[in-house]
Amino acid sequence: MKITAQEEYGLRVLLRIARHGNEEGISIPALSEAEGLSTAYVAKLTRMLRISGYINSTPGYKGGYILAQPADQININKVLKVLGGALFNKAFCEEYPGAVKLCTNSIDCSVRSLWQMIQFTVDQLLDKVSLQDLINPEQESSLLLESILRQNAR
């Protein structure tokens, strides 16, 4: 399993917007420079985030992007699914059956059970993380995320 570039950079762009504040927006060129990404890629990511309702664009010369809702109400699991989808969904077995029309393991598949368990665990954990939890410096965020992980393990 891999985190895609789109998920990583999309989350970083959203975090950069959140850290910038809500008075005035941050522009695509400013986001591009701050994150070391092309303006076209940042435009693609901000479009996805705007269509999904996580950010709004502000018009005018000093316009840019702001959060559409408070950072503590933005669920990281949902953001990642908008940017790249779930790690595993049931349609995977239908889309990748191999050389034949139907998967040879479509009725009895212990591997599918593993992927479903991993997806369930990841969902449970990420559903407890908000954008606000990531705004702090890395050391503070790390402590907070560790406490969420410990609570989830109980």
Image (cartoon, rainbow, N blue to C red):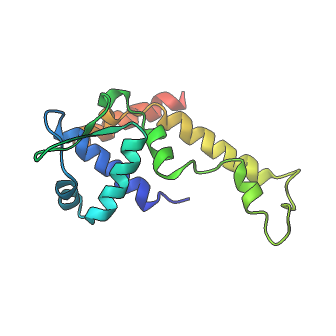
Q: Position of residue 18 (x, y in %)?
A: 24, 39
153 left or right, relative to 27: right
Residue 34 location, quadrant: bottom left
66 left or right, relative to 109: left
Q: Is residue 138 visible?
A: no
Q: Quadrant of the N terminus?
A: bottom right
Q: Is residue 6 visible?
A: yes
Q: Residue furthest left?
A: 61
Residue drawn at x 88%, y 50% is 107
Residue drawn at x 16%, y 55% is 30
Q: Position of residue 32 (x, y in %)?
A: 22, 60
2 left or right, relative to 68: right
Q: Position of residue 77 (x, y in %)?
A: 48, 39
Residue drawn at x 70%, y 49% is 114
Residue 69 location, quadrant: top left
Residue drawn at x 45%, y 30% is 128
Q: Position of residue 17 (x, y in %)?
A: 24, 43
Q: How many marks?
A: 0
Q: Residue furthest front?
A: 60
Q: In the displayed structure, would residue 38 be above or below residue 91?
A: below
Q: Quadrant of the C terminus?
A: top right
Residue 74 location, quadrant: top left
117 left or right, relative to 51: right
